Amino acid sequence: MDAVIRHAEVSDLEAIGAFFRDPEVTRQTSQIPYRSKEYWKSLFNIDDKNHIQLVAESSGQILGHLGLRTQENPRRKHCASFGITIHPNAQGKGIGKQLMATMVELADNWLNLVRIELDVYTDNSRAIALYQGFGFEIEGESKCDAFRNGQFVNSYRMSRVRLPIVDSTPKITPRQNARPDMTVRTFKSEDREAVVRLWKQCGLTTPQNNPESDIDRKTAMNDDLFLVGLINNEIVASVMGGYEGHRGWVNYLAVIPQWQSYGLGKTLMSKLETRLAKLGCPKINLQVRTTNHQVLAFYRSLKYQTDSVISLGKRIDD
């Protein structure tokens, strides 16, 4: 089920509070039944600057809510906690994944959070699997953590820790207005660590696309369309091409930030296009988010045009 993920508004609070009227929703939270509307308005205070609240909306109905609470303590500015609730009729339909993916992207790329934590009851296997799919790990178990349905229950403390990226690559200082000499060759197995580091630096990794798995799948094809660019024997750029006999594809085009705007991406694309042409490829396709104006301008400068098509996709690896 597709939904629009947006920030919560005051008008959404009544619908969010209504989730908890369902006993199965309430039993997996720390709330109790029969709360007033005013209670939910105070709990989900839209004006709380430390509480970022997202909702999933489909056909005018609120189907999910996620609240990410950042820390005021200066020594825990790198940490946040969150809670997520899905409408009873929308559970198991991917709404939780959409909310989690949005939260993780926000935490990594905009809030610079290192640690995200939460508590979850040990018998909530569906939620635990969802969190583990986004890199959360169980850190410990709290005995008799809550009273629920007449008995005490245990909970897990889970967290996702994104360690700050430490670039161990020797720094290469660009010369002003000088085009660097870059060597382009096919990816080798020993390039793996440097390439993953490059992708992370360029913000190309997401929870849905594990870079290690993507590299394994690509190298298994052995088609010589996975290219890297090197300056002084250090990997500074990459592109992962593909061809299935009908269309060529471009993925993971990346240039280390300090060498961007020096034409390295254009050089890599030229090398890839040459190899695809030798294979008889008549057309190359690629996908760019509509909001990524800088990358769109780059590809248009290489004569790539917007096709009058709708891009569809379906994940079959879940």
Image (cartoon, rainbow, N blue to C red):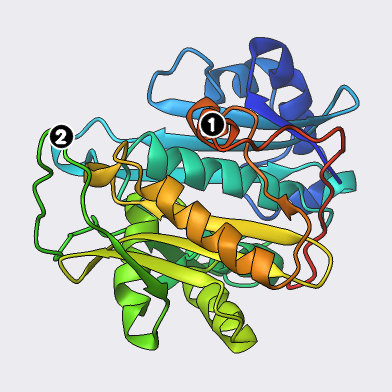
> For the residue labelled by badge 1, is the local secondary structure a helix, a strand or a loop?
helix
Residue 120 horizontal/vertical position (percent): 54, 61
Residue 270 horizontal/vertical position (percent): 51, 54
Of labels 1 and 2, the one closer to you? 1
Question: Compared with residue 135, is residue 107 higher up or lower down, i.e. above or below?
Answer: above
Say left or right for 293 vs 260: right
Report if the CB atoms under discs 1 and 2 are less than 8 Å apart. Answer: no
Task: Residue at 54%, 62% (x, y): give it.
Answer: 272
How far is the residue under mark 1 from the one under mark 2?
Answer: 45 Å
Residue 231 horizontal/vertical position (percent): 21, 62
Task: Residue at 59%, 27% (x, y): give it.
Answer: 291
Residue type, label 2: Pro
The quadrant of the image that shows the C terminus is bottom right
Residue with the mark numbered 1: 301
Task: Residue at 42%, 48% (x, y): give it.
Answer: 265
Question: Compared with residue 88, is residue 123 higher up or lower down, i.e. above or below?
Answer: below
Q: Earlier in the sequence, mark 1 or mark 2?
A: 2
Q: Quadrant of residue 76?
A: top left
| Residue 208 shows in the view | no
- How many other residues sit within 10 Å of disc 1, few (<14), some (14-19) or many (≥20)? few
Q: Quadrant of residue 193?
A: bottom left
Residue with the mark numbered 2: 74
Residue 178 horizontal/vertical position (percent): 16, 39
Residue 288 or 36: which is nearer the viewer? 288
Residue type, label 1: Ser
